[in-house]
Image: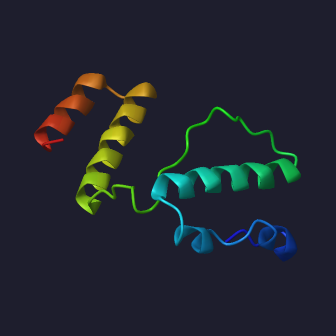
Amino acid sequence: MLSCFPAAELQRYGSFRQARTTMSPPEVSLERKERNGQFLKTLGVAVNPNLPRVESDTEARFREPKEVAERTVALYVVISVAHEADRETAFSWLKNEGL
């Protein structure tokens, strides 16, 4: 929760849950993007208007925990190689692990 912001400031932008009942998922996410952009501007944060909308929770595809863990390990190995770990050893290990 955004507890560091004054409650009145948060209430000013309304409830996301209220908007869900009458809008389609893309409309909800576009409305949320606009509302969040306005909120950030009141805080003095620059907002790039060309950023894409984030899909709504009904549109989002949630990954299985195993898939998330595998991707995390693979990215860790990539980062290790970027920080001068032996590339062949790292990728050989990934292959042996089935990643």
Picture layout, residue 81 above or below residue 18: above
> Which corner quadrant of the image does residue 77 belong to?
top left
Nearest the viewer among 97 and 26 is: 26
Q: Position of residue 10 (x, y in %)?
A: 78, 69
What residue is at 34 percent from the left and 58 percent from the top?
62
- In the picture, which quadrant includes the N terminus? bottom right
Tell me if 74 is positioned left or right of 6 in this view. left
What residue is at 53 percent from the left and 62 percent from the top?
23
Can the viewer see residue 2? yes
Tell me if 60 is positioned left or right of 40 in this view. left
> Which corner quadrant of the image does residue 63 belong to?
bottom left
Q: Position of residue 89 (x, y in %)?
A: 23, 29
For this orientation, the residue located farthest to the front is 22
Can the viewer see residue 4? no
What residue is at 78 percent from the left and 51 percent from the top?
38
Q: Position of residue 65 (x, y in %)?
A: 28, 61
Tell me if 88 is positioned left or right of 55 in this view. left
User: Looking at the image, how many numbered discs can be counted on the residues?
Assistant: 0
Nearest the viewer among 16 and 4 is: 16
What residue is at 79 percent from the left and 55 percent from the top?
39
Tell me if 36 is positioned left or right of 53 in this view. right
Picture layout, residue 75 above or below residue 55: above
- In the picture, which quadrant includes the C terminus? top left
Nearest the viewer among 75 and 19 is: 19
Q: Position of residue 19 (x, y in %)?
A: 60, 68
